[in-house]
Amino acid sequence: MRCSQPIKLLFFLLCYLFYLNAKAQLNRDSFRNTHKKETYEERISAYLNFGEKIGQHLFEDVISVAEEGIIIASKNKDLSAVGTLKRQIGEAYYFKGNYNTAAEYFYASIGIFERSNQLQKLADSYNALAKLYRKTKDLERSLENYDKAMNLFKTLKDSAGIAMIYNESGVVFEYKEDYKEASRRYSASLSIDEIKKDTTGICYALSNLAGVYTIQNNFATAENYLKKSLLFRKKMNDQFALALNYSDLANTFFSAKEYEKAKVYVDSSNYIAEAMGYPELRGSNFNLLSHVAEKQGDFEKALSFNKLRTAISDSIFNIEKSKKIEELNTRYETEKKERTIVEQKDKIVLQNTIMIAAIVLVMLGSFLAYANYRRYQWRQEAKLQAETLLQQNNAIKAVIDAEETERKRIATDLHHGVGQIMSAAKMNLSAYEQYADFQSNEQKENFQKIISLVDEGCREVRAVSHNMMPTALLTNNLPDALNDFLTKLDHNALKVHLQSEGFHEPISTNIESVLYRVLQECINNVIKHANADVLDISLIKEPGEIFATIEDNGRGFDTSKNVGRDGIGLKNIFTRIEFLKGTVDLSSAPGRGTQIAIYVPVLDIKKSFYKKI
């Protein structure tokens, strides 16, 4: 790996060694308090946060806490927490150098997230496994897992994750000495960080690029990138980052054998480190100065700087002791802050409860208002539909009344007009026969034939008059009127069976008249067209409806070809039943007879509609 990066990491780790130990102790104390909470969510959150905050040190603590958390998460069937804790254990073993055990936990974590389709966490586990393979120099498997993580981050549109993978995977190509691809990936990470205006990310990307150029002995470009990073860090006023940046510049100039410049930047780094109280970084800088002095042949200074570095290293133990007092103060401040946070949480919970209650009341009020509005709309629609149906029924009734009135008028004219004339003609012919002097029997027979024709015409007029306005329908109910009509048929040619029930109460005259006409039309169609010898008629009246069926055993017809319905007879049947808001079902097939089923509602439509409302 490039020479500046290990030094940078060494500076960072040494500089923050005691700070992280103190912070880790604080995290442990906070964990002890937090994980005693009653709710599962609070407890498991404490376990997860513990591993995330101190995951790169205190590895044994991370492992023991995470294993305890796995037991709790498994009991609650929380696969997400189990997978995350397994990844944390794997990372702890990774930093301990136990790569085999780390791989087992990484793969277990990946399996959980793959089965539960948790893409974000799966990408993090792929990244962790990729770093492990990078560490063991299995570069192809490392890149394979980096690619998996990259694809998931792209699917999730996670630009921060994408930038991270570009930076991480770039190191693999440095190992492969493919510095062009490494630079491309670092540059891609830099582009994303610049778009996101992530200054911290920009600085690290620039430092990575500088490291590549330092390895390639392109010291001018490396210097340019580090100085650009230095400008950003000056704007951020991140003193420790500035110290590291100066140290990186010093290492670059040291590699370029510009030892005087290296000393200048090392002194700048040491100045900041001393002002901020980072002895570990100063020790690393003294180590670099020792190497510079050795390269310049000043072995006395080299030994002096080395002694300074050793003295700082020895002082670490004293610093560790002095931090105990600060730790107690930090714990107190932390507990105080936690109490304040709890109070604030309670206040927020109360505010949220009030807000939720208000929202529920508003939603309930809105729902009731909407329900009342919809009920009003339904009533208005019902009223409009009822009025429309009433108007339609009145129009239908007017049409039927007019038709029945006209039938009655024609029947009366036939009976009192043509019928009486025909009867008078028959009487006159019969009287004339008594006085007529027929010359032969043939003349007398011809005269009697004339009388017979006149008599037949009288009967025909009476039949037509009766069909148009049957007397039985005026004096009896529908089944009786229909039975009276059937008695006039030739029962030798057609046997008719009539069955009726439920006609105890009177029904509307209009409905009765229309049904009579329809049934009469059906019977006439059977006589004229069906060539049947048996006809079954059923009339059933139930509350609010009438059912009628007419079934013959005649020759039938193919209904798919619409044969018969184009005729006037069937058209009249369908039209009249539609006037009554009823339905007609026609079923027939060649050689299998014909069946007509009729349904007619008989309740007052307006009253029925409001009853349903």
Image: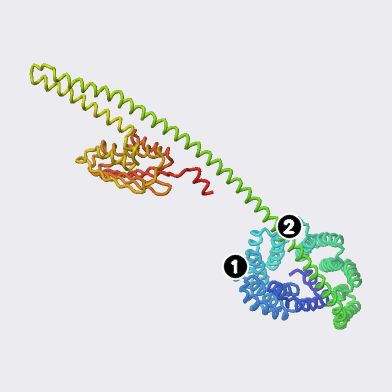
Closer-to-camera residue (259/12): 12
Q: Disc 1 on helix, strand or loop?
A: helix
Q: Amino acid at mark 1?
A: Ser
Q: How many labels were placed on the picture?
A: 2
Q: Disc 2 on helix, strand or loop?
A: helix
Q: Is residue 224 above or below residue 10?
A: above
Answer left or right for 197 relative to 275.
left
How many residues crowd around disc 2 within 10 Å: few (fewer than 14), some, or many (20 or more)? some
Q: Is residue 27 visible?
A: yes
Q: Is residue 509 above or below residue 59?
A: above
Identify the residue position indicated by label 2 in the image: 192
Estimate the x, y position of residue 215 in percent, counting from the top left: 76, 66
Closer-to-camera residue (124/455): 455
Between disc 2 and disc 1, the foreground one is 1
Estimate the x, y position of residue 472 in percent, counting from the top left: 31, 37
Q: Amino acid at mark 2?
A: Ile
Task: Name which residue lies at 33% across and 25% down.
Answer: 413
| Residue 116 - label | 1
What is the CA distance from the residue labelled 2 to the residue labelled 1? 30 Å
How many residues crowd around disc 1 within 10 Å: few (fewer than 14), some, or many (20 or more)? few
Q: Is residue 585 above or below residue 290?
A: above
Please tell me which of labels 2 and 1 falls first in the chain: 1
Closer-to-camera residue (210/214): 210
